[in-house]
Amino acid sequence: MNGFYVVFSPFNFMLMVVGILLGVIIGVLPGLGGANGVAILLPLTFSMSPTSAIIMLSCIYWGALFGGAITSILFNIPGEPWSVATTFDGHPMAQKGKADEALTGAFTSSFVGAIVAVIMITFLAPLVAKFALKFGPAEFFAVQFLTFASFIGMGKGSAFKTLASMSLGFALASVGLDTVTGQLRMTFGITELLTGFKFLTAVIGLFGIGEILASMESGLAFSGAHAKLRLNAVLETWKKMPAYYVTFIRSCIVGCWMGVTPGGATPASFMSYGLAKRFSKNGDRFGKGELEGVIAPETAAHAAGTSALLPMLTLGIPGSPTAAVLLGGLLIWGLQPGPLLFIEQPDFVWGLIASMYLGNLVGLVIVLTCVPLFAAILRVPFSIIAPIIMVICAVGAYTINNAMFDVWMMVGFGVIAYAFNKLSYPLPPFVLALVLGDMAESSFRQAMLLSQGSVTIFWSNGLVGFIMTLGLVLLLWPMISWVLDKVRAPKPA
Amino acid sequence: MHDKEDGGPSLVSTRTMDIVVALLLLVVSAIVITDSTRLGFRWREIEGPASGYFPFYIGLMIAISSVVNLVRAIRSGERNKTFVTKQAFRQVLAVLIPLCFYVLVVGWIGIYVASAIYIALFMWYFGRYPLLKGAAIGIAVSAVLFAMFEIWFLVPLPKGPIEDFFGF
Amino acid sequence: MIGHASKSLKVVGFAAGVLAGALLATPAMAQAWQPTKAVTFVIPAGTGGGADQMARFVQGVVTKHNLMNQPMVVINKAGGAGAEGFLDMKASPRDPHKIIITLSNLFTTPLATGSPFNWKDLTPVAMLALDQFVLWVNAEAPYKTAAEYINAVKAGNDRQFKMGGTGSKQEDQIITAALERLTGGKKFTYVPFAGGGAVAVQLVGKHVDSTVNNPLEAVAQWRAGALRPLCIFDTQRSTYKDKVTTDMAWSDIPTCKESGVNTDYQMLRGVFTTQGVTPAQVNYYVELFKKVMATPDWKDFMEKGAFNQTFMTGDQYKNWVAANETLHRDLMKEAGFLATN
């Protein structure tokens, strides 16, 4: 409990609040990610003690995790990659005038996810670290496959349009340098294409710009403008949330698992959303503004984001880009992340863990008090807010790679989204393919190299075999349930 | 999605757009497959599955699904379903064209000045706000962005002659 | 630095003198060039890697000790194995407010991908250090020396042994190819991963048989007793004698040559600026980095990563870079890594 003592000093508490506020701002602005924020502020922290520094920096991280949801819900612009899945139901809720409910739901679930992950880190750290070591390329591929399987095969509409949309995402993901062989693919000598298509550029264009174009067409009304200001929205939403305890538990498991392995917060949010949609009795209403569709991705994303710090501390492998920058910070402060950190620097580690509990609590209080403020933004007239959103999108797209080319890409993706939406080509499979394509492809090929071309590697041990089989079951679930129905009720009289 | 019943005459039908998109995707698949064949899509001694392995099959998948979509669209009887009406399309272009101009201008005069002008004109044109009010909001937004990115987070954004003049 | 090019000056302990020199020299250079706006420090690699850590560390030291009159801004331009960053430098000649940190991809990326740039499109400023490579195996593996391991590869089946590394056709794979000259025709299966830390953990988890991680990437696992260093790819042993684990220091790791595996390779950690800048501008950065190196923080950082502290500037540095480029071309040609188109 010494950790709490460290954190409770007024100075550290102040750093915590500053960190959270900065983090929320960073999270809100697309393109400026937690990794940027931490990297930029890292130098400022060198004059502090390592414990104070990590408290401030990790609080920026929590703030960014909270903040990503805000613009997703209000304007359909994911501030961070892991809040893409939050837009699916969060934005429709805002359009129905329930922005406050969606925000409260998102913040509260983020908090629950983070706390569960911290509890896991507190009590199971050594065990979990050992588990992460079991993950080689085959296991990574299996997890990515599972993410896909849990998300695909549930869309409405034409299966072939879903397939086309998803494949296009994969194709764009493979543009640029192939990390396995070092060859350039589909760049055709164009320098700007060397970096490939960045997930965030695509997402800002597809969701942010696409949304504005759609609103423009239907005549200037921003659909959320009739947002009511309800002062008791937080309490009202809290009353509804316990009913979704199954979703909470499932999402926490998904999140912790994906954070530790490390699969990352973004796939975790997609997987959790997919599973919630599949197993919820309201599944067919997902995408039209279900609170459960906000809870699932937010809980998982925050659980994953938090538990991603565990492999960083115990193994020195960062589970996210932000964790990677924090890792650099640890080295500069003279701390050596790795298996011995818990033994050699207990003050630091427990101070960090204590700050995770408190930082998230403080963060929750701060963002919840701001819910009416955020919801009120929707009352700003469309012709003022729309150009500001466009500017913020452009800034966001630019900062990802510091390239004007990406801003053009963003505009292009906006047009694609406009056309795809009207022709009912689904966008979620497209973005999921874009975010997972690269990783899944390299894991697959690494595994193939290790096994010298034999697919049996995906069933070579219990762990990988279990995940792959689970993925196959989920992928074929529509077929399986159809067969089960036939068996159960052979002849409806 | 955003169907308009009273938006005036139809500009293009959904069926036509479906055909156009399917054809465009076929072009994409052709590009992907061509480049994958260049890279090779079989097993290589040192590299395992070659660089083109994955994109090749992805290209095939785009091609197959697009052919199905194309055939379905051609056979579809919904010739009269409107993709977009003339009036709605004019609205969309009214946003899209200035946006392209804005992005183009950012490259010359920097993002801050361009943003202020863009916001002011957008408010004036669509919201019928006086130019002065638009300019005030535009400059305020640019100033906040400038403070945040250039000074606070030290993330350089595109700048033009005016920022140069002030020594940034 | 494979071969005998590394007989260069070792400049350990030289930095302290430079600080005094730099301080004395400051008034005399009053009319010398100073940056008039923020200086951009480009990293042609992703966040969290070795180059990224070093650049951000430099930025931290500069800020902490107030070494510059203008802020230093760090930007990652990692696309296309670093080509993005180098092409950006090439596209802005005579801009003295841009510097770039380099790793071996300065040579390997244009050779392997055909990206149109060369170090001659840049102006060399200074070599900060040389990064070491160490041959690691899992601590539970039976091999105690590099020779034992190489003999096992020789005796085993072709491609039976898996070498994990960072990136493709870059330094890790080049070293692997160099090792294959000594394995009697038997090849490794080289498996590329995204980052050095991940590679080390793959070795701990026994998904690969060996790695050639940098010291900084693997030291934590070594100290925890999960990995065993077999040899260091340098011509001389490391100069760091403080114990890292309970019984070993960096200097206790034998060189690969003395373990009968005649291979060495070191990686440039150097700084360049854009082409066509004035000597006064280059000199400003040389002095700046001398000041950075004189700080105790820098010495600490060097020791933690067991860097080879070689400092070079001017023609000496330029010649070193030219020689190193030729070396990479030869090695990559031999391994068949050159771009075909």
Image (cartoon, rainbow, N blue to C red):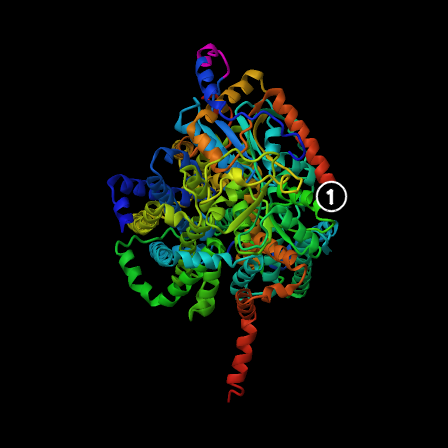
- Residue C32 sits inside the magenta stretch: yes
Pointer 1 residue: C336
* Residue A90 location (% of width, % of height): 41, 56
Q: Is residue C8 above or below residue B17?
A: above
Query: Does residue A459 appear left or right of residue C48 in this picture?
Result: right
Q: Which residues are magenta?
A: C25-33
- Choose between C30 and A108: the one closer to the eye: C30
The residue located at (48%, 26%) in the rendering is: C293
Say if C101 sits above or below A71 in the image: above
**Subunit that carries the residue with mark 1:** C
State the residue in front, B104 or C311: C311
Query: Where's residue B5, x and y in %?
Result: 51, 58
Q: Residue at x 61, y 58 (%)?
A: A447
Question: Residue B89's x, y, as percent?
Answer: 55, 49
Q: To which quarter of the image does residue A164 belong?
A: bottom right
Q: Using the rendered image of the protein, determine whether residue C270 is visible from the camera's viewpoint.
A: yes
Residue C38 in view (yes/no): no
Left or right, residue A352 beside residue C225: left
Count of number-bearing discs = 1
Image spot of residue C62 (x, y percent): 44, 27
Mark 1 secondary-structure assignment: loop
- Amino acid marked by disc 1: Gly
Q: Residues within 10 Å of mark 1 (few under 14, many from 20)?
A: few
**Residue A123 magenta-drawn?**
no
- Residue at 63% of width from left, 20% of height from top? C315
Asked if C61 appears above or below C278 in the picture, the reply is: below
Residue farthest bottom in this picture: A493
**Could you say which is closer to the camera, residue B55 or residue B126?**
B55
